Amino acid sequence: MSKYQVNEKGYYGQFGGAYIPEMLYPNVEELRQKYLDIIQEPSFQEEFNQLLRDYVGRPSPLYYAGRLSEKYGSNIYLKREDLNHTGAHKINNTIGQILLAQRLGKKRIIAETGAGQHGVATATVCALKGLECVVYMGAIDIERQAPNVARMKMMGAQVVPAQSGSKTLKDATNEALRDWINNPVDTHYIIGSVVGPHPYPDMVARFQSIISEETKKQLLEKTGKSNPDYAIACVGGGSNAAGMFYHFVDEESVKLIAVEAAGLGVDSGESAATTALGKEGVLHGSRSLLMQTPDGQVIEPYSISAGLDYPGIGPQHAWLFKSGRGNYVSVTDKEAMEAGLLLTRLEGIIPAIESAHALAYLEKMDLKPDDTVVICLSGRGDKDLDNYMKYFGF
Ligand SMILES: *Cc1c(COP(=O)(O)O)cnc(C)c1O
């Protein structure tokens, strides 16, 4: 049993658990009792793998970035999650959860979304399976993310504005939880990252672990070794990083680097660098690290990339950080935007601004000519073109 994976009580070190209102207990408990049996069934595995292959387009390539490698004097590989159907890694998880929901006999799916990426990935699999889909989204986010709202509606999802509080992600999460409490029998709640009460962080990490499973095989084919020297990923809630780290956490020779969004700077007051700024506390049903005031109010995070704009991290990341197994770092908006442009100019790949955070850390590393580096390119930059154009004044 790995000391970095969840234990039978639902904890990673002191982090994790299920801190939920009593009214939610039956829903979460049903999931906890059944998730491992269901996802290990051969028929589940068969359908999951078939959809990942024929619908998502997996395995995603592991691309040797020649010009980027030359620039940094090392060997840099990109795990191309940007080439997945819907443009990011999030679909790996929503496919897994929709198959689980079906096997639990659920007829209705709910989700919350901030930037809309998880909402789109959820609406997509609901269309695929013909299940009713309700996505809660802050009223302000609905205005800011019109193209993703349109995608969700086109796929038949109902997008419900959250009008309370700051009208953003945390308010949408509260609405989704209220819905789930009121519809315990027929509804499954698809959470989009390795956050929330146990068993969500472990379940989502298992669905995303396909990223490192494929990477190991692909690296072995290309280099003769299945482990890199470094595995790097950006962290919002932490699901693409959890997937990229999954099969490497017990290989202590692989250095794990998780890159958070420093926004305008870690000490600027406009940041989402949770490990640098966060304290232990409970957020969205689990004990982890989160950005909070001394009296425990959650601090509004900021990042230029909507997908990293989250005030906490999943409990496994809190533990990888606390135990010293992972190196948690941050880069600013400016560093990320420049790294996004650099990849575009050197390799002809426009990355999501989230993924550009992982790339930006290359500047700060002391890489050697025979090091092998794998970076999770979590998503493509099409959704970010407006942002890139405004930033660079194209
Ligand atoms: C949502 C998103 C992220 C951040 O979420 P994680 O759960 O931390 O992976 C990163 N990259 C892209 C492209 C995203 O859409």
Image: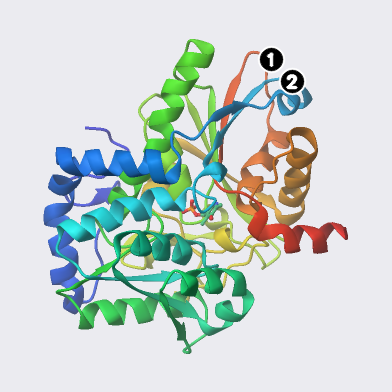
Alpha-carbon span between mark 2 and mark 1: 5 Å
Q: Element at badge 1?
A: loop
The part of the image, by quadrant, that contains residue 359 is top right
Q: Is residue 290 above or below residue 213?
A: below
Residue at (57% x, 63% y) in the render: 309
Image marks 2 and 1: residues in contact by CB distance under 8 Å = yes
Q: Position of residue 205 (x, y in %)?
A: 35, 46
Q: Element at badge 2?
A: loop
Crowding around mark 1 (Cα neighbors within 10 Å: few <14, some 14 to 19, many 20+) is few
Q: Is residue 238 above or below residue 301?
A: above
Image quadrant occupied by the C terminus: bottom right
Q: Amino acid at mark 1?
A: Pro
Q: Which residue is mark 2?
A: 73
Of residues 55 and 94, the one nearer the viewer is 55
Whether residue 59 appears in this view of the structure is: yes
Of residues 254 and 84, the one nearer the viewer is 84
Crowding around mark 2 (Cα neighbors within 10 Å: few <14, some 14 to 19, many 20+) is some
Mark closest to the chain's N terminus, 2 or 1: 2
Residue at (14% x, 41% y) in the render: 41
Of residues 250 and 240, the one nearer the viewer is 240
Q: Which residue is mark 1?
A: 369
Residue at (39% x, 41% y) in the render: 54
Residue 1 shown left or right of residue 224 in the figure: left
Image quadrant occupied by the N terminus: top left
Colour scheme in the image?
Answer: rainbow
Residue at the far right in the pictured view: 393
Count of numbered badges drawn on the protein: 2
Residue at the far top in the pictured view: 224
